[in-house]
Every structure is written in structure tokens, then in C-alpha cells.
Image (cartoon, helix red, strand yellow):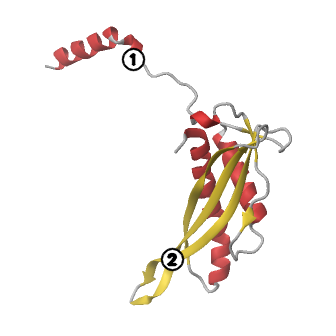
């Protein structure tokens, strides 16, 4: 039985050589002509202070890690990615043992809206929103704990944005 299965598999591999997977450009069709991106400082519509530069820097690092696009200055880039932090939400993820009213762990969710504009024409290529998530444990200072978790949520949003721009999802 095993020999018959091996022979059948080998015959299919020889009969269907044109069905092999080949690597190619996986970018969405509207981003095919774009090679370089610019990411200016983000806007912030939330009450989180001084996070605009941190968000833009994290998004640039995420795009560089992905490697699909080269990051350039706006005057040298094919397109510009404008981003706005529109929400940061904290919700309880785990309660303290023995006290369901006290929270020991929170989930932090950030919402970043983006718009990709082609520099040559000024035409909007893509737009949407991505979420970034992380969790953090509560210590004596909840505000500091949340501030320390914010870069991790931004990093998750950067990975999702890079995936959206390079693969379309």
C-alpha cells in the first residue's frame, strides 16, 4: 500500500510540473508602483500626551522590518503614509483571585487610522484603520504601567499596518 502511494505521488509530481509555487510580488494592486514610503509624524486625537513621534517611529521600524518598502524623506518618496492615533482603550483582562472587582491584568487596544497618498498625483491609494493590542499587569501605578505598555501596542499596530500595505490584509 505504501509503495502504491509513493508511486502515485511521484507520478503526479512528474505529470504536473507547471503547478509549482513561484515567488512574486504580493503587494496589493494599488501599491504595485510604490517602492518608497514616507511616514511623517503622526497626529493624535486622544488624550495620550506626546505619543505622536513614538507612533511614527514605531511604524517606520515596522515597515523597515517588513522590508517591502524603502523608507525615504517625503520629497523623495513615491507615497506618504499619514497616520492618526484615534483611540486608546484599556479593558480588564483578568481579575484578582478572590476579588472579582479588582483587576490584575488589562488589555490595551490602540486604533490607528492611516491614509496612503501618492506623492506625484496627490491621489489617495489606500485608507483604513489598524488595531494594536497588548496586555499588562497592574502594579501600584496604573498610569505608568499603561504608558509602558503603549509602545508594545504601537508595535503590534505597526506589524498589522505593514502587513496591510505589503500584502493587502
Of 20 and 40, nearer the camera is: 40
> Of the residues under marks 1 and 2, which one precedes in the sequence?
1
Q: Which mark is residue 98?
A: none
Q: Residue at x 53, y 24 (%)?
A: 23
Q: Which mark is residue 91?
A: 2
Query: Where's residue 86, x and y in %?
Result: 64, 67
Q: Residue at x 57, y 73 (%)?
A: 89
Characterize the local packing of mark 2: few (<14), some (14-19) or many (20 or more) Cα atoms within 10 angstroms: few
Is 97 placed above or below 91 here? Answer: below
Q: Residue at x 60, y 66 (%)?
A: 110
Label 1's element?
helix
Asked where in the image residue 41 lies, by quadrant, the reply is bottom right
Query: Where's residue 100, x and y in %?
Result: 40, 88
Asked where in the image residue 57 lies, by quadrant, the reply is bottom right
| Left or right position of 55 against 155 | right
Residue with the mark numbered 1: 19
Is 120 placed above or below 133 here? Answer: above
Label 2's element?
strand
Amino acid at each position: 500500500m505504501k509503495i502504491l502511494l509513493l508511486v502515485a505521488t511521484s507520478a503526479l509530481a512528474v505529470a504536473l510540473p507547471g503547478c509549482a509555487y513561484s515567488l512574486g510580488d504580493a503587494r496589493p494592486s494599488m501599491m504595485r508602483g510604490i517602492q518608497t514610503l514616507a511616514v511623517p509624524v503622526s497626529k493624535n486625537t486622544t488624550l495620550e500626551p506626546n505619543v505622536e513621534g513614538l507612533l511614527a517611529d514605531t511604524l517606520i521600524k515596522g515597515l523597515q522590518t517588513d522590508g517591502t518598502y524603502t523608507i525615504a524623506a517625503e520629497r523623495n518618496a513615491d507615497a506618504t503614509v499619514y497616520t492618526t492615533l484615534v483611540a486608546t482603550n484599556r479593558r480588564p483582562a483578568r481579575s484578582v483571585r478572590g476579588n472579582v472587582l479588582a483587576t490584575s491584568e488589562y488589555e490595551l487596544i490602540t486604533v490607528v487610522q492611516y491614509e496612503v497618498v501618492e506623492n506625484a498625483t496627490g491621489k489617495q491609494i489606500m485608507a483604513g484603520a489598524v488595531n494594536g493590542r497588548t496586555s499588562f499587569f497592574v502594579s501600584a501605578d496604573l498610569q505608568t504601567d499603561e504608558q509602558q505598555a503603549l509602545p508594545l501596542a504601537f508595535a503590534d499596530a505597526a506589524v498589522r499596518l505593514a502587513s496591510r500595505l505589503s500584502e493587502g490584509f
